[in-house]
Amino acid sequence: MEEKKLDINSIIGFVLIFGILMYMLWQNQPTPEELEAQEKAKQEQVLEENKVEEQKETIVTTQEDFAITSPTDSLGQVNLKNKHGDFAYAFSIAKASDAETVVESDLLALKFSNKGGYLSEVRLKQFVDYDSLPIYLIKDNNASFNINFGTTDSRIRNTKDLPFQPNITKNGDVTVVSMKLKVSETKYLEYRYELKEGDYMMDFSIRSQGLSNIINSSQAINLDWGLKGYRHAKSISYENRYTDIHYEYEGGKDDYTGMSDVDEDIEDVTWIGYKQHFFTSVLLTDKPFKTSRIKSENLVEDETIDTVYTKSFAATIPLELQGGELNQSMDWYYGPSDFKVLNAYDRNLDEIVPFGWGIFGWINRYIFMPLFSFLGGFMPYGIAIVVMTILVKILLSFVQYKQFLSQAKMKILKPELDEIRTKYKDNKMKAQQETMALQTKAGASPLSGCLPALIQLPVFYALFQFFPSAFDLRQKSFLWVEDLSSYDVIAEWDVDIPVISTFYGNHMSLFPILASIAIFFYMRLTTGQQMNTQPQQEGMPDMAKMMKYMMYFSPIMMLFFFNNYASGLSLYYFISNVISIGIILVIKNYILDEDKIHAQIQENKKKPKKENRFQAKMKKMMEEAEKQKQAQKRK
């Protein structure tokens, strides 16, 4: 029995699906900012000109400033007063400049630098990286936090250089860390952190007391927050693909910077998140920042050399005075990029997880995420992927049935269509008219095979987004795979092979190979015979050749692109295509009956067929074109 194959339009649908894949992968390639150096130089020049014009003095703190520990050292006090003005008191009571304050909860281990009052170390206690080392979001000066402001004595101050006095109090499960930059015992700038047990979110506030006559209200006050993201995954390039800045603005809108280097302004910002694939640092505010400038710079040009940091992030946020004082309520989030954790805060933080836009994100949020969480609750995650794939393919099996039904009708009509093309071989327009008329009577439109194929597109793209972002897959093993959120390895080599190392990598993953083989046999099963039965239309591309190229190109593309992707995604594609092959064989051999289909087509041809508007319009256009052609011949 001759095998049934999909029609051309089904292949077009498949091409569209892979086109989206290619577009998404290539649009994430980083584009260097050629004008960044010039812009930085220009900003520095403007800053220097402003400093000269206003005759301000930027204070540089040295180790000697912290040597005075006694308020009764009169000579030291005079020196500090001359150099630091109103903030001389802070230095007089300061301890060593490298002193730190340490606190912990069940989830976070934190260190605060007494010089600057900011978080100098953040460790997530429940996670380790690909090499079983602790996960640090902040460590060894990879982060900065500073408020830059002018004073009434014509000086520029940076809080990162000034000494803060720490004070720790506990109230039940809440640990409060107060860091005060003191002008006196009753006048100060305070950073207040509230760390809660079982919570990745910390309350954070910036407020001043008694500084209205010290802070220069006519000069801009800027909060600068910077971070260089540490590598936490086996493939730094793959991790970097999902590392970027996310932010919420204008009352609930959200956006992200993507892979490209970025330097831009955003308005009415309510939170800014530095996302490092599976871990995120977020600064949130109760009162929106009117303007903020964000920067993102890729730090990985060669993953064999650049192995420590993924991207550099920076944000400059203007702060406003209220009655001459600072009073800004905020929050810090340091934790996993886990949809369930982020969604629980009800502050739109779940948008940090890139589930896709529109219908794709809807499918992931309300179908795949709950389903996967349910299955993962009582079975290993690798098995959960297999079971979810089976359920999805069963639900979409009607699509494949519609495709094969359309293909079967076209196959049965092929002898009559060939006869029409032979009869009107010298009149292509008439051949097309008769072909359309026959297909309309028989109820066998080629579009009926394309539309079902397009139905699968949202599911395909949604799952492409889902598996790389599923935090639950992180460091979960299955068969030979150590981590379903990263690539599996069956062979690796240290030698860089030109082209191969660039596009394929220095390792071989098994699941992409299995998925590529499954895709090849699936396409061979669905397109092999169709290439031989599909006629060549004059003026149209040779679809038989296109399908042949696609049959080989798609598996090769899968093999190369997915070698560095999450093995959970490749597992899904492998199982999905194996099931598709099984469904096709069942439909072909046990469900579709060509004799019954042929009899139904003959019955349809006997019935008067009402044309829809599109068919009527196309028929009229063809008739008009035929009349014009005949008129030209008579001339």
Image (cartoon, grey):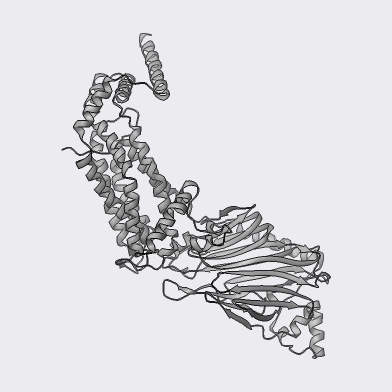
Residue 363 in percent (x, y) is at 45, 50
Residue occupying the point 79% across, 69% down: 215
> Image height check: is 249 above or below 134?
above
Q: 94 or 394, which is in the foreground?
A: 394
Extreme residue toward the front, this view: 172
Q: How many marks?
A: 0
As drawn, is 423 to the left or to the right of 275?
Answer: left
As drawn, is 104 to the left or to the right of 19?
Answer: right
Q: 635 or 370, which is in the foreground?
A: 370
> Image height check: is 415 above or below 521?
above
The answer to whether residue 496 of the structure is visible from this angle is yes
Residue 138 in percent (x, y) is at 56, 73
Task: Residue 248: name its quadrant.
Answer: bottom right
> Image height check: is 469 above or below 524?
below
Residue 52 in percent (x, y) is at 79, 66
Extreme residue toward the left, this view: 1
Quadrant (top left, top right, bottom left, bottom right) of the N terminus:
top left
The answer to whether residue 21 of the structure is visible from this angle is no
As drawn, is 299 to the left or to the right of 478?
Answer: right
Task: Residue 173: name its quadrant.
Answer: bottom right
Q: 573 or 368, which is in the foreground?
A: 368
Extreme residue toward the top, this view: 634
Residue occupying the point 82% across, 89% down: 74
Residue 398 in percent (x, y) is at 32, 42
Q: 597 or 127, which is in the foreground?
A: 597
